[in-house]
Amino acid sequence: MANYHGRSGLVYMSATGATAAVSVANLTAWSLDMSRDKAETTCFGDANKTYVAGLKDISGSLSGFWDDTDDTLYDNAESTSGVLMYLYPNSNVLTKYWYGPAWVDMSVTVGVGEAVATSGTFVANGAWGQY
């Protein structure tokens, strides 16, 4: 088992799904939450609570610095049909990544004494997978 530093992560997006996915510039972090709905099934006399698993509720976040030459995150947030996302934990292992259709939101934060930052959130717009 190998360990990797997060500095080489990547996020690729395609605003239409029909165009090639491109790297989102100047990101510094991303997260992916693949939580599952759970319904309690505990009965009288059970030794502990029990559950059955339901659907995944895939969501996540992106953050980094605003780049005046790259509108990729903005363009994807403007998509009316959703986007395709590819999340790579490390660019040295391009054979391992999570992918799927998503809805993307974007924010920009500006403050005195800070670099202009950008961030985003996403939720699934269909089935996700992992390579």
Image (cartoon, rainbow, N blue to C red):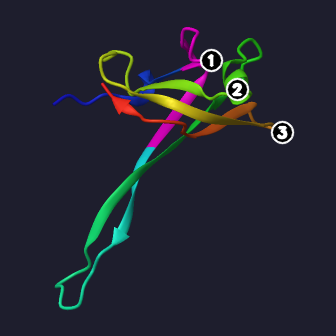
Mark 2 residue type: Ser
* Place of residue 89 in the rendered image (x, y in percent of width and height, measured from the top left): 38, 28
Q: Earlier in the sequence, mark 2 or mark 3?
A: 2
Mark 1 residue type: Thr
* Place of residue 109 in the rendered image (x, y in percent of width and height, measured from the top left): 77, 38
User: Which contiguous range is marked in magenta?
Assistant: 13-32
The answer to which quarter of the image holds residue 62 is top right
Label 1, residues with CA under 10 Å away: few <14, some 14-19, many ≥20: some
Q: Earlier in the sequence, mark 1 or mark 2?
A: 1
Left or right of 95 in this view: 13: right
Residue at the disc numbered 3:
112
Q: Residue at x 74, y 11 (%)?
A: 69
Mark 1: which secondary structure?
A: loop
Q: Are marks 2 and 3 in contact (CB under 8 Å)?
A: no
Instruction: Please tell me the numbered disc located at residue 16.
Output: 1
Nearer the camera: disc 1 or disc 3: 1
Nearer the camera: disc 2 or disc 3: 2
Q: Residue at x 49, y 36 (%)?
A: 126
Residue at the disc numbered 2:
79
Mark 3 residue type: Val
Q: Any magenta on residue 87?
A: no
Q: Are marks 1 and 2 in contact (CB under 8 Å)?
A: yes
